[in-house]
Amino acid sequence: MKPAPFQYFAPRTLDEAIDLVAEHGYDAKILAGGQSLIPTMNFRLAQPAVLIDLNHIPELNYIQPNRDGGVRIGAMTRQARVERDDLIAAATPLIHDTIPHIAHPQIRNRGTFGGSIAHADPASELPSVLVTLGGQILARSKRGERWIHADNCFLGIFTTAMEVDEILTEVRFPATPPRAGWSIKETARRHGDYALVGVTAQVNLAADNTCGYARLTFFGVGDGPVPAMQAGAILRGEKPTSDAIAEAARTAAQEDMEPGGDLHASSEFRRHLAEVLGRRALTEAFERATTRGGVA
């Protein structure tokens, strides 16, 4: 099929794009990588009257160090560039490990970092990473700019806290501490498919080698990223033994989520996957934290 008729704009500056979004409001859709939007338009599941293409705005394409040791990623930065970037690998290794899980290289060559987060697909990896790492997004409009923390960003399926006249321009992440470890695990029907269940994790070891914090976020099990708050609380202040990790993973699957079922996986099977993947992710994350902390 072909998309319904629409007006097309290709602004050359961010200010021009912001003006267009303010003018057209709910009638407009923003085109970033287009890997999700264009198929839905071709099937006429989305029929915007106006398409605003951000691909000609170079100021939205960058990876830069932040003053706190973290990273700043422009919204139009291609996922493939993030995958290969040395700064990303050093400062936020969870992002570096996550990008190869996203679809296929052809998709990552066009897909943008900010576009994936703004789309807020509940089975997508990058929103989960944003929550796990405690990142922030920068939303710009004619009214000014504001930072939205990951904890307040995702409101429901394909829905963020951004207003209709705002454009996501930057994503910011803190640096990974020296005694921290990370992991991403997911299960899909085929390589490159959306995950039936996935999880991202980051943990930190305190000076006495107990768990300083454990952040575990699941995707594919709700209307958006699902942080396993009770699982993290179980581990905090405890030695990360295999029994403690198993209890945390079991709590995450049974108490921190209410996964739905579909023709690909039942609710019960998703809980089972969540427990198994949660245990594997926490185990790997604590092993990495131990190695990076120089703990024998």
Image (tube, helix red, strand yellow):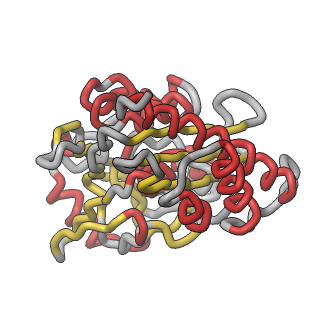
**Which of 177 and 223 lies nearest the eye of the viewer?**
177
| Residue 226 in view in this figure | no
Q: Position of residue 5 (x, y in %)?
A: 50, 55
Which residue occupies the foreground of this view, 200 or 283?
Answer: 283
Q: Give the x, y percent position of residue 235.
A: 56, 57
On-image quarter of the N terminus: top right
Residue 42 image position (x, y, % from top left): 60, 47
Q: Is residue 74 left or right of residue 1?
A: left
The answer to whether 262 appears left or right of 162 in the picture is: right
Q: Is the residue 141 above or below the residue 292 in the image?
A: below
- The correct choice, above or below, for 64 with respect to 90 in the image is below
Give how far across and how far down residue 131 sits, in percent. 45, 57
- Image quadrant holding the C terminus, namely top left
Residue lying at the far left in this picture: please name it.
67
- Asked if one can make out residue 287 in the rendered structure from this viewpoint, the answer is yes
| Residue at 24%, 43% in the rendered image | 71
Please give the name of the residue rendered at 43% of the width and 37% of the height, measured from the top-left corner: 289
**Residue 223: quadrant of the picture:** bottom right
Q: Residue at x 51, y 24 (%)?
A: 106
Q: Depth check: give the residue in front, 125 or 281.
A: 281
Q: Residue at x 41, y 71 (%)?
A: 152
Toward the viewer: 12 or 107? 107
Residue 18 falls left or right of residue 272: left
Looking at the rendered structure, the number of numbered marks drawn on it comes to 0
* Left or right: 173, with 194 as reference point: left
